Amino acid sequence: MDHALPHPSPSGAERDHPWRTIALVVAGVAALELLILVIVGIALLAKPIAHRAITRAAAPVAKKPAPEPMLPLLPRRLVSVTILNGNGVSGAAATEASRVRARGYKIGVVGNAPRGSYGHSVVMYRAGRIREGRRLARDLGISIVSPLDGLRKRDLHGAKLAVVVGG
């Protein structure tokens, strides 16, 4: 059977450099290089990850802090309150002390806070006196109630609660 187009016979250049063999060898070398790069990458990444996992596993588990003791709710007349000026405005602590006294609380010390940059007024309480702190905050319209934060027990001068007057 005759074909319209003659079938080209391999020339001398194609016989000396078989392109298919070269392509297969190059693809094999590239695949081998890729495999080596993947193994090296896994080895480099796995070591720090494994080290981090081991140190986390060996680290002690943080225990939840023990809940605060719930002391009986004291009547207002038995709760002493220290009033501290935390905004730098002269007379702010004395004005707040008048408001606190009018609600039936005992006033302890009226003075200045260790720092004068409180943006909002805060009611702080000693351990076990959160309910008294919340009640005082509700009485005064203060939205922030927290344990002694930035104050020490000695700053309270024996009082159960402190009001830090903010800006």
Image (cartoon, rainbow, N blue to C red):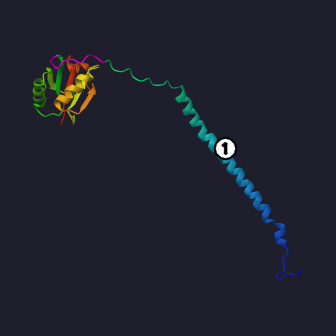
Q: Which residue in the structure is indicated by mark 1?
A: 39
Mark 1: amino acid? Ile
Q: Is residue 26 above or below residue 17?
A: above
In screen coordinates, is 118 left or right of 69?
A: left
Nearer to the camera, 3 or 77: 77
Q: Which residue is at the far bottom?
A: 4
Image quadrant occupied by the N terminus: bottom right
Give coordinates of residue 54: x percent, y percent.
56, 30
Q: Residue at x 27, y 23 (%)?
A: 130
Give coordinates of residue 31: x percent, y percent.
71, 53
Q: Secondary structure at mark 1?
A: helix
Q: Is residue 71 above or below residue 49?
A: above
Nearer to the camera, 75 or 112: 75
Give coordinates of residue 7: x percent, y percent.
84, 77
Image quadrant occupied by the C terminus: top left
Q: Residue at x 22, y 19 (%)?
A: 160
Residue 73 in the magenta stretch? The answer is yes
Q: Residue at x 70, y 54 (%)?
A: 30
Q: Residue at x 16, y 30 (%)?
A: 140
Q: Which residues are magenta?
A: 70-77
Residue 52 in the magenta stretch? The answer is no
Q: Is residue 8 above or below residue 100?
A: below
In screen coordinates, is 37 left or right of 13?
A: left
In the rendered image, which quarter is residue 138 located in? top left
In the rendered image, which quarter is residue 27 located in? bottom right
Q: Main secondary structure of the magenta part?
A: loop
Nearer to the camera, 13 or 102: 102
